[in-house]
Image (cartoon, rainbow, N blue to C red):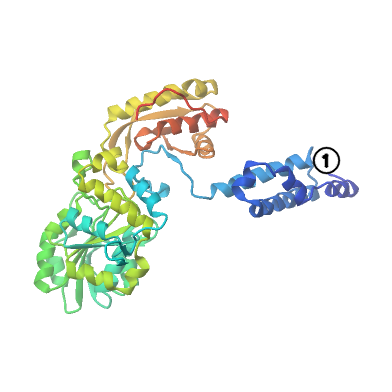
Amino acid sequence: MKKNSPSENGSTLRSLPSVDECLLRLVRSDVLARLGKRRLTDIVRQAIADTRRSLLAGKEFADINQTIDALVSEFASKSLNRRLQKVVNATGVILHTNLGRAPLSTEARAAVIAASGYCTLEYDVNTGGRGVRAPLAERLLAELTGAEDAVVVNNCAAAAYLVLKAFAAGKEVIVSRGELVEIGGDFRVPEILAESGAAMREVGTTNRTSLEDYNAAVGPTTGMILRVHPSNYRVVGFTEQASLADLASLAEKHGIILFEDLGSGALLDVSRLGVSDEPTVRDSVNAGAHLVAFSGDKLLGGPQAGIVVGKRELVESLRKRPLYRALRPDKLISAALEATLLAYSRDTAVDEIPVLRMIAEPVDSIRDRAAAVAEKIRQAFEQAGFKIRLREGFSTTGGGTAPLAKLETCLIEITHPENSPDSIAAKLRSGEIPVISRIENDAICLDLRTVEDAERLISGLLETISGNASRSDEQIPT
């Protein structure tokens, strides 16, 4: 590349526009409206500085203003992409942790909007005085699980920590070696136990822990037996696990607490929807667990929340702890959880709650929807050199639930002879309507099981090809 002479460089540098000149060109732009003047000014300064460095390094530009405007557009796009934004989940992973796990029901979303203003979070309209936070959610949780009482905090890790801190600090907690799990990238059972001030007493082996192993470990400093449901893995083959009912009898015999961290929080039997080996919360309560903790945003299908149900005196003790105040949910979580639980109370959960509806959708229905989407995009994609076909595949529940569950589905497979799957996936993510796909067998795969709005998916796909978020007037099966 030809290097500019010092005099040429000086002349070119003097041609750099000022920040005000650049902002004047952007005064009517969409990016100004979306970012605001202060943030856009910072981006313009960055673009001018980058251009100045390139000039000093000897790089030549045909049009300085055009170069700076392109950098501003690039930096602005990256800045906006850092915000929370709506995406199309076409991965087939129903509880996709990185995409926010459970999508809320229509009723829950409406409840969040209603509660976003002033609401009766801790106000009793009957007395005009202070009320209890989220009393309906806690009453519904007790009714739906058969527990005596319930309390809600902001996530399941917080629920487990609250229980351990309240009842096991300075005491021994007996836990099977096969249940010392890591869930996600941050939650490890041994670390939570240590943080709570409890001493961990490991029993059994990774694959076999008998009732006698627990019984032999009980001593004068034992405060709790902890049972952890292996949400994101299974040990199969030569295994043994003491039943929850037997552990409850053992705990009662020695006057200690049996606490189960159930994790996924199924409020109904999901085996009838095709997901096996996931106990319900009611099963644990009926088996005799004194306290059971579970998530609100997994198989329950609601907002992120940690829920503890169980014996009234124990739950009430949790509610009185100063730590509870630091962990309790806000008004938006409380509203969404109430609306979600009301669907269970009405026996309409499978129809109303997206997670359950997605799990229950038969493969024939998904195949019909996939075929309709493929037909809508086929012409534009094939003209651009892509190949599209339908093939059979599997969806997963994800989110640390039912790791062995494989739900039959139909995939839209997209390939291109010159573009790698990674580059196609990146392009799909970069549009105004980000489409999140999965790569399988060296191809882009779109799974309609996790796509609620097929028209939005089509718009995002066509935008990738043409830059125009086109929408067809024809109705796509939903």
Residue position marked by numbered label 1 in the rendering:
2
x%, y% of residue 142? Answer: 19, 58
Residue drawn where x is 56% and y is 28% of the image = 466
In this view, the residue in front, 153 or 346, is 346
Residue drawn where x is 41% and y is 37% of the image = 90
In this view, the residue in front, 127 or 176, is 127
Q: Is residue 469 above or below residue 131?
A: above
The quadrant where residue 62 appears = top right
The quadrant where residue 327 appears = bottom left
In the image, taking residue 221 as reference, residue 198 lies left or right, namely right
In the rendered image, which quarter contains the N terminus?
Answer: top right
Q: Is residue 229 visible?
A: yes
In this view, the residue in front, 438 or 108, is 108
Q: Is residue 415 above or below residue 286?
A: above
In the image, taking residue 29 as reference, residue 425 lies left or right, namely left
Q: Amino acid at mark 1?
A: Lys
Residue drawn where x is 87% and y is 50% of the image = 10
x%, y% of residue 379? Answer: 49, 20
Q: Is residue 242 visible?
A: no
